[in-house]
Amino acid sequence: MFRSLPAFGGDQRAVAEVVRGIMDGKTNNTGEITLTQSSTTTILTDRRIGPTTVILFSPINLKAAAEIAGLFVSARGQGTATLTHGSHNFDMKYAYALIG
């Protein structure tokens, strides 16, 4: 987790530090997940997910890269998303970014 600010801002130095981090790509909206083996769904739990959040995936291993076309978000709610994918008996690891 990267530094954040209180709901009503902070002092100048804290604001500058957070803005500098954002400009350097430190937006605190990423994570990693391994899809459930021998199943066609995996639950992604992240407090930052909401009903309209866009979830983008980037494969971390070769198997995940080969299977990414079959991965999609089939449901979203507050703090959770259901990922639908093909059944497999090997680890498929993805990094993800949350927007919105």
Image (cartoon, rainbow, N blue to C red):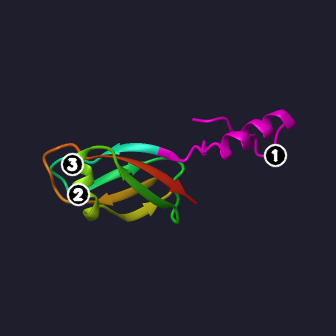
What residue sits 16% from the left and 44% below the top?
Answer: 90
User: Residue 26: which quarter of the image?
Assistant: top right
Tag 1: amino acid:
Phe
Mark in the foreground, 1 or 2: 2
Q: Nearer the viewer, mark 1 or mark 3?
A: 3
Task: Name the spot of residue 93 as percent of width and height, x first.
Answer: 30, 44
Residue bearing the label numbered 1: 8
Judge whether 13 appears above or below 40 on screen. above
Pointers 3 and 2 in contact (CB under 8 A)? yes
Closest to the observer, 36 or 68: 68
Judge whether residue 3 is colored magenta: yes
**Which stretch appears magenta?**
1-30
Secondary structure at numbered mark 3:
helix
Q: Which residue is mark 2?
A: 67
Q: Which quadrant is the N terminus positioned in?
A: top right
The quadrant of the rendering that contains the C terminus is bottom right
Q: Residue at x 52, y 61 (%)?
A: 53
Q: Is residue 37 above or below residue 67?
A: above
Could you tell me if residue 11 is visible in this image?
Answer: no
| Mark 1 or 3, nearer chain start | 1
Q: From this viewpoint, is residue 14 visible?
A: yes
